[in-house]
Amino acid sequence: MSVSDLLVDTCIIGGGAAGAYAAYRLHQLNHTVAIVERGSHLGGHTVTYRDPIITNNQPIDYGVTWLQNLPVIRDAFAHYNIPLVKEKIDYAIDMFNFATGESVTPIPANEIIAALDRYETLLAQHPYLETGFEDLPDPVPEDLVAPFQEFMDKYHLDGLLNTFSSWLSGLGEWPDYPTLYVMKYLGTDYLAGRLRLGWVRPQSHDASEIYRAMEQELRGAHQTLLFNSSVVRVDARDSAADRMVVDVATVDETRRQSIFTCRRRIRAKTLLFAAPPLPDNLEVLGLDEPERSLFRQFKDPWFYTALIRVDGFPNDTFLENHGKNHPFHRPRLPAVLAFRPTDVSGIVRVTVGSTSRGLSEAEVEECIRAGVDSVRRRLGGGNVSDSEILVVRDHSPYTLTVSGAAVAAGFYRQLSALQGHRRTYYTGATWDTHHMPQVWMVTDQVLQRHLLPGLRGVRG
């Protein structure tokens, strides 16, 4: 062993919401960690822009913005003395087809309320969906593996067509997904925030503040954070040795060329994989056939966010792209899904979706410009300026799913059985859904049920 080797209890691959929270919790429990993160900061989908033109340098979130008002959120923010404020999403919504300008017909409020009541009653029949997939019954109920469009028809939820089309716009072809995924995304806590409790966000309106605080605490405690870094090799996952070997390459930020110049070796008792479980990310693990046979079943849509500077957009309205003639109001993709106001007048948040292929940044920008033209036509022309694209972020893969047949055949039972297999554990949105509180809660579940008992079983 080299004197420069890093000895830790757990090496965490991925410093997004799951990896950062896992490090925070393991540090609280007096364990040593090393995070390997490809980006330059913690937080993953939580991204914040500061506009140089604004005199007070006001932060503008264009990833995670509002949070469910849950204990897991309140506890972490309180730990770092970051005050939270309550907010409600009470913007008006203008639904129309960006291609044709046709408006979507509103649904009467009484029909929406009645359908929401039915949906919440149905959701309450599946309390095991609250955290993760590990507690799914065997067999999985037929309703959960059926395509969601069939579930909507069966339970007369057509009153929620516009509502679901709005809330689920970033989820890909959600009418075709097994109902399981929609019920995870629109779960009990999410609906409570939407309908009753409202949301919280940092008083600073900077969702990234929590991850900067985590980074500062971890560095101050001499935990290892390797940014701009990638794992190039993992060895001894199957070995009888007390620790596995993780070799890491780091980009030298002092040079303009993105060349891997620094190599580090981590010796860890356990490995926590907190990145999206895609083939390119998993390759370094040297998957065995049980692992490979599960992970290759995942499919995903592509999802992007951006901020634009544009004059003439309303400050109090979400502008949403819906295909009026599609049975579930899905627009033709790739395209802008929605324009939404930010805290700064003249800066608008944009979401862009694609279900057939990934988009280059230039293609995302082309979608945005076409969307701005659609809004200009909608609003009568002259007052809408040309847009300046400030920043674009690729959030893909946004939702990894498998078929209803795979779910029925025990996919998630088999996936859960991988926890601890070859001293490797898994967490992230794929093990729950793409809301930060749920990612944190499932990460805690993985730590308590699997990783911490695994650490106790390792010598040294």
Image (cartoon, rainbow, N blue to C red):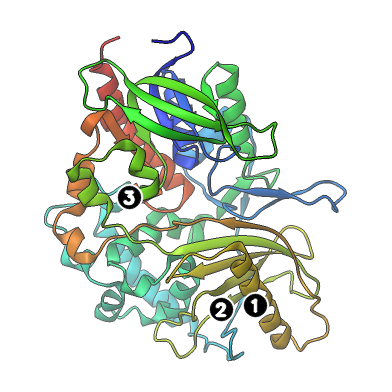
Figure quadrant of the N terminus: top left
Image quadrant where residue 180 sits: bottom left
Nearest to viewer (mark 2 / mark 3)? 2
Q: Is residue 387 above or below residue 216?
A: below
Figure quadrant of the C terminus: top left
Q: On residue 229, which mark appears?
A: none
- Spatial CA distance of label 2 from label 3 is 30 Å
Number of numbered discs visible in the structure rendering: 3
Q: Amino acid at mark 2?
A: Asn
Q: On the image, numbered disc 2 is attached to which residue? A: 321
Q: Is residue 271 above or below residue 275?
A: above
Nearest to viewer (mark 3 / mark 1)? 1
| Residue 173 percent across, percent down from the top left | 39, 72
Q: Nearer the viewer, residue 391 or 409?
A: 391
For this view, does 256 lie left or right of residue 189?
right
Q: Amino acid at mark 3?
A: Glu
Q: Nearer the viewer, residue 346 or 286?
A: 286
At label 3, counting other C-alpha atoms closer than 10 Å, the crowd grade (few under 14, some 14-19, many 20 or more) is some
Residue in the picture at 51% in, 25% down: 263
The reply to whether the C-beta atoms of the residues labelled 1 and 2 are less than 8 Å apart is: yes
| Residue 138 percent across, percent down from the top left | 12, 53
Q: Amino acid at mark 1?
A: Gly
At label 1, counting other C-alpha atoms closer than 10 Å, the crowd grade (few under 14, some 14-19, many 20 or more) is many
Query: Can residue 92 be seen by looking at this rendering?
Result: no
Disc with the residue nearer the chain's start (1 vs 2): 2
For this view, does 323 lie left or right of residue 366?
left
Q: On the image, numbered disc 3 is attached to which residue? A: 130
Q: On the image, numbered disc 1 is attached to which residue? A: 371
- Spatial CA distance of label 1 from label 2 is 9 Å
